[in-house]
Structures are given as structure tokens and as C-alpha cells.
Image: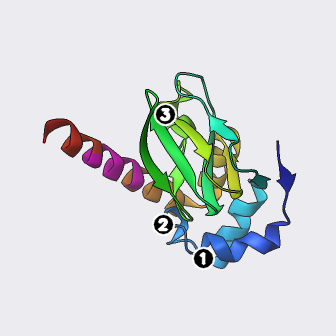
Amino acid sequence: MGRMVGKRVYIDHLKHVPLFSECSRKDLEKIAAHSDVIELPAGRVIMHQGMPGSDAFVVLEGTVTVRRNGRKVVDLGPGAVVGELSLLDQGDRSASVECASTCSLLVLTRGEFLAAIDEVPALSRKLFASLAGGLRNLDGRSYV
């Protein structure tokens, strides 16, 4: 995919990611052991709507564009998580995501994430809170 980046470089970034905000430095090191960081150029598609997926991505640097049914939904920057539903069910992607700029992304595969949850229980609570917040936002947009 893209160029790999050293783990020490991004552990400090993880502290500022809402998903990891309750994690201690030791927890972040455990998460780092279960993940990789890649750098991708602008224009690279991270995931395609309707295709199966099992990875989630945390934006460490740069901006990604989320599109649903070909329409731009939102631009997301550092701290945003995309693809997190795949960590739970490995279902089809609900949106396409593309790098709007050069991006540094933390990659969590489903297997690595489940292993990280075993070691860092706070992570599962944050993921569920994040998913619930996303559903509430979606719900609000659907009925307003």
C-alpha cells in the first residue's frame, strides 16, 4: 500500500484521537503493537462503498473525503476513524473514502483490533460510544 512509518513516531498522535483518549501510554503501546501506520498520496481510495472490508483507519495526518452513493458526505481530519463498522461485522463498506491530501493513517485489522481489545478493555467502550454517536447523527439527518 503505502510507506510504513515507525511506531514511536505516532504513539503521541494517538493520545489526541477520541477513540484512544482514555488509554494510558502503556495501552497506546499495546495498540501500536497491533497496528501499522501507512502514508498514502492524495487521490488514493482507502475503501470502496459496497465492497467487503475488515480494516479500520485512523487519520493521523491529512484529510480524507467520505462519499456515499457518489456524493461527498464530509471531509475528516486528524483523529477521525473510518471503517470502524468492519471491526465488528466484516460487512460491506457503507461509504467510499479517499485521501484528499497526503495522509498518514493508522491501520487496524479486525483480528488485530480484537486482540487489542483483549489487552485494552477501554478501547471497546470507546468504539461503542463512537458507533452510537455516529448512529445518532445519521438518525438526526434521516428524519429532520
At label 3, which amino acid type do we have?
Ala
The mark closer to the camera, 1 or 2, is 2
User: Residue 81 at what x, y percent from top left?
Assistant: 53, 53
Residue numbers of the magenta segment: 130-137
Magenta-span inclusion, residue 131: yes
At label 1, which amino acid type do we have?
Ser
- Residue at mark 3 to residue at mark 2: CA–CA distance: 21 Å
Q: Which mark is residue 144?
A: none
Q: Which residue is mark 1?
A: 24
Q: Which residue is mark 2?
A: 18
> Measuring 32% from the left and 52% from the top, which residue is drawn there?
133
Compared with residue 47, is residue 112 higher up or lower down, i.e. above or below?
below
Side (left or right) of 143 relative to 39: left
Circle 1: element type: loop
The mark closer to the camera, 3 or 2, is 3
Q: Which residue is mark 3?
A: 95
